[in-house]
Image: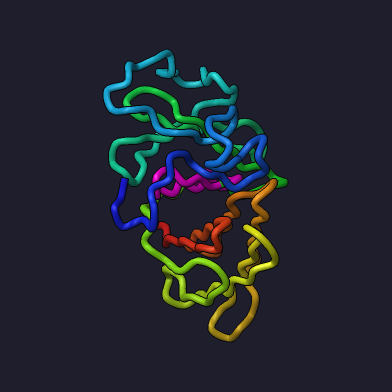
Amino acid sequence: MSASAPRHRTVLRTAAACAAVTAAVLGPVSGAFAAAPAQGAAASAYTQVRGEADGGGTYVRTVRLADGGSIAKIYRMGPGHYRAEGFFDGESFGSIEATPAKPYAAGNLNGMITALSSKGEVASWIAQARPTGPHTETLADGKTVARVAEYGYQHYRAYLVDRNGRTLDTLEVDGETKFLAATKVGSLWVVLETDGGVTSYVGR
């Protein structure tokens, strides 16, 4: 995807627990964005029409992702419950889900971040090179600060604060059950990964 990403990942990490939203280390799993299919892969039966998703739900819309070649089809699964299924060259590479209990989900496919909210909002961007480990950084909106603390191997917590030091939200990953954590503060999307890296994006 983007050479500016700190390293290419072969599968898409996700923000909810591993059964529904999992990480690169687990490989392709039902309910998680997995590896993108190779260029030229044959189109399969993933060309659903409205209301006919393999994973259930009602089709809402299709969104083009940040790499320019992938798309996400958005399905409403129920009140406050949405699923985004990613496709490349006609073939699915998995899905992420946001629910009332876990209102934000995200995945990382080779540096392309895709995030979803339980309202059906979607954002996609290419992650830039960024600090990892314990650190403090200003995020994409130029005013929110992430203070990242380390609590163990692949266990990080990011405190999002405003200019006055007021805590806006907290994200946590543990490297065992939660590999990505995502949130949205106003128009700012934020994702924390198990290397302590934070990537963010201001939605339109």
Q: Is residue 61 visible?
A: no
Is 108 covered by the magenta stretch? yes
**Residue closer to the observer: 56 or 112:** 112
Q: Is residue 51 visible?
A: yes
Is 15 covered by the magenta stretch? no
Residue 198 against residue 70 in the figure, above or below: below
Residue 159 against residue 33 in the figure, above or below: below
Q: Position of residue 182 (x, y in %)?
A: 57, 55
Q: Position of residue 18 (x, y in %)?
A: 65, 39
Q: Residue at x 42, y 66 (%)?
A: 130
Where does the magenta region start and end?
A: 106-121
- Which quarter shows the C terminus? bottom left
Residue found farthest to the right: 101
Residue found farthest to the bottom: 164
Q: Position of residue 39 (x, y in %)?
A: 28, 28
Q: Position of residue 64 (x, y in %)?
A: 35, 39
Dominant SS of magenta comes to: strand
Q: Residue at x 40, y 18 (%)?
A: 47
Q: Residue at x 51, y 74 (%)?
A: 144
Residue 72 against residue 176 in the figure, above or below: above
On the rendered structure, is 204 left or right of 162? left
